[in-house]
Image (cartoon, helix red, strand yellow):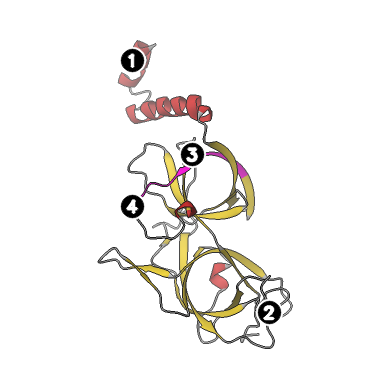
């Protein structure tokens, strides 16, 4: 068998890289489901906007210290298929939460994998008074990484850093001259919501665009939010803020 494989590769019928990839894929397929950390979760299909079942391995994330309060907010996903589609900003769902891919670095592994982070808020807004509200799962933090020192610093009071997947809905957000507003907070408290509005939108740093535009823009968008005053027109029942651009 090994000799037959050698003859095929030597004759050029099977390129060496393809051969070793096929062998690796066969090995992964044979042992993947034997692992105790294999789960069926849901992944958002970018084309249909529907969540579909996929099988992955879920492991703790053992990256560098990132000075976050909840370490369990990060997980590592490993995929069985070496050709699986995996983009920065991809969305997943399991354990009752939504998660976003924030890193696709695969230096320490030969498989397809990514680091995901748990979403902890939802941004709700509408484009017009009569339109259906748009809901975007998001990651909210009050800490910012300083690139030079590699240290995290806490943002001033009344400021939030938000990360959302790059999508058609994300591109409907505004920051000037009439920024999009949100009601954030715990709806079960007496003072249900706080009012926040977009101060800036970064659609460059974490957005990935192929040279030939063969793949739709992936990645995620960073928003800077600042505390603002509630409007008497805000809907405290639905949690939808009144927009000045109506």
Of badges 4 and 1, nearer the viewer stands: 4
The residue that mark 1 highlights is: 7
In the rendered image, which residue does mark 4 sit on? 64
| Sequence-earlier tag: 4 or 1 | 1
Mark 2 vs mark 4: which is more N-terminal? 4
Residue 65 image position (x, y, % from top left): 34, 55
Q: Is 97 drawn above or below residue 28 in the view shown?
A: below
**Which residue is denoted by mark 2 in the rendering?**
128
Residue 228 occupies quadrant: bottom right
Please identify, in this view, whether the residue under mark 2 or under mark 4 is nearer the observer.
4
Task: Identify the residue at horizontal 55%, vertical 74% (top origin).
Answer: 173
Helix, strand, or loop for circle 4? Answer: loop
Marks 2 and 3, the one that precedes in the sequence: 3
**Towards the viewer: 156 or 110:** 156
Mark 3 lies on residue: 79
- Report how far apart the C-alphas of labels 2 and 3 lie in the structure: 41 Å
In this view, the residue farthest toward the left is: 148
Q: Is residue 79 visible?
A: yes
The magenta stretch is 53-64
């Amino acid at each position: 068998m090994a000799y037959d494989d050698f003859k095929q590769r030597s004759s050029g019928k099977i390129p060496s890289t393809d051969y070793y990839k096929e062998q690796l894929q066969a090995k992964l397929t044979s042992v993947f489901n034997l692992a105790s950390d294999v789960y069926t979760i849901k992944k958002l299909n970018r084309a249909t906007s529907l969540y579909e079942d996929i099988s992955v391995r879920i492991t703790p994330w053992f990256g560098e210290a990132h000075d976050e309060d909840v370490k369990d907010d990060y997980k590592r996903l490993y995929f069985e298929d070496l050709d699986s589609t995996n983009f920065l900003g991809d969305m997943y769902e399991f354990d009752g939460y939504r998660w976003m891919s924030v890193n696709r670095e695969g230096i320490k592994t030969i498989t397809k994998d990514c680091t995901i982070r748990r979403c902890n808020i939802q941004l709700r807004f509408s484009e017009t008074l009569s339109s259906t509200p748009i809901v975007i799962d998001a990651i909210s933090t009050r800490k910012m990484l300083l690139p030079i020192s590699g240290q995290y610093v806490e943002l001033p009071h009344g400021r939030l850093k938000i990360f959302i997947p790059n999508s058609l809905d994300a591109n409907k957000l505004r920051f000037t001259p009439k920024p999009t507003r949100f009601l954030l907070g715990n709806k079960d408290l007496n003072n249900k919501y706080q009012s926040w509005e977009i101060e800036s939108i970064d659609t460059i740093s974490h957005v990935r665009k192929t040279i030939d535009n063969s793949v739709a823009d992936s990645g995620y968008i960073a928003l800077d939010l600042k505390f603002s005053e509630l409007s008497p027109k805000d809907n405290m029942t639905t949690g939808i803020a009144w927009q000045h651009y109506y």
